[in-house]
Image (cartoon, helix red, strand yellow):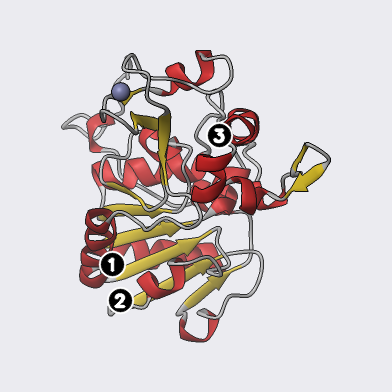
Amino acid sequence: MNGVEKLNRIVSSAKNIVFFGGAGVSTESGIPDFRSADGLYNEKTIYPPETILSHDFFLSKTAAFYEFYKTKMIFLHAEPNACHIKLALLEKNGPLKAVVTQNIDGLHRKAGSENVFELHGSVYRNHCVSCGKKYGVEKIIDSVGVPFCVCGGVIKPDVVLYGETLDENVVAGAIGHIGRADVLIVGGTSLGVYPAAGLCGYFNGKSLVLINKTETHLDRNADLIIRENIGEVFSRIDVQTPDLINSKGNIHEDA
Ligand code: ZN
């Protein structure tokens, strides 16, 4: 039995699956891992991405922050790949209870997943730092330079920058779901980025599945390790789709 066949067996007998994903989930939708992006050449200084995407940099060099952020972090035309789509189906028609993601691109929601814990926030949500007014991503894209609120305050993405803490409610929700899961599928992350590894440590269920090209420190605890493209793996997971099948078991012609 190969890895995907084993995964199908695990999924078909699972009652409560949680998926935990990292940057590798989005790269197959054409979204590069920002850690591999070029820095920003500015005022004779080269700032690495980790510096630009920090709380201090946002406050002190807001225009430079947005110069980088708008071109390197927002991908509105990216489409969900087989992994996002299959996870949404597994939530709708199967045993998947939650998706926990480190990505900020909103692709799980775009694919139709509803119970999504976005640990690092989302580019689609933004707020004024002065009055709290909420804004969509269009406001950021359409603004020339720094986006400002009607009140004159600076608008900030609801994205967790370096030097900022994660949203407590999101973390608590993720931990609760991971702790109750009987299957945890971890994909597209080397688990090196805080707080991924710590959160996966709350898993106490039956089967831990890792889908990642490279080794992670959880490999020794895993029940199944698959070193293939995550989209390719998910495209081969079987999901029942009862809403496409009528009572006689035939597929609707007009479906
Ligand atoms: Zn405001």
Estimate the spatial distance between the alpha carbons at disc 3 and disc 2, rounded to whole Å: 37 Å
Q: Label 1 CB, ligand 1: below 8 Å?
A: no
Q: Quadrant of the N terminus?
A: bottom right
Which amino acid type corresponds to the residue marked 3 in the rendered image? Thr
Please determine whether, in this image, residue 18 is positioned above or below residue 71.
below
For marks 3 and 2 on the same chain, the one whose residue lies earlier in the sequence = 3
Name the mark nearer the viewer: 3 or 2: 3
Q: Quadrant of the C terminus?
A: top left
In the rendered image, residue 155, in percent from the top left (x then y), is placed at 41, 28
Looking at the image, can residue 123 be seen? no
Q: Secondary structure at mark 2?
A: loop
Name the mark nearer the viewer: 1 or 3: 3
Looking at the image, can residue 55 be seen? yes
Task: Using the image as rendered, state which of residue 73 and residue 42 is in the foreground.
Answer: 42
Estimate the spatial distance between the alpha carbons at disc 1 and disc 3, rounded to whole Å: 36 Å
Q: Secondary structure at mark 3?
A: helix
Q: Secondary structure at mark 1?
A: helix
* Residue labelled with disc 3: 62
Q: Which mark is residue 202?
A: 2
Which amino acid type corresponds to the residue marked 1 in the rendered image? Ile
Mark 1 is surrounded, within 10 Å at the Cα level, by few (under 14), some (14 to 19) or many (20 or more) other residues, namely many
- Check whether the beta carbons of the residues at disc 1 and disc 2 lie within 8 A of each other: yes
In the rendered image, residue 66, in percent from the top left (x then y), is placed at 58, 30
Residue in the picture at 23% in, 31% down: 243
Residue in the picture at 26% in, 40% down: 114
Q: Which mark is residue 178?
A: 1
Please determine whether, in this image, residue 2 is positioned above or below residue 149.
below
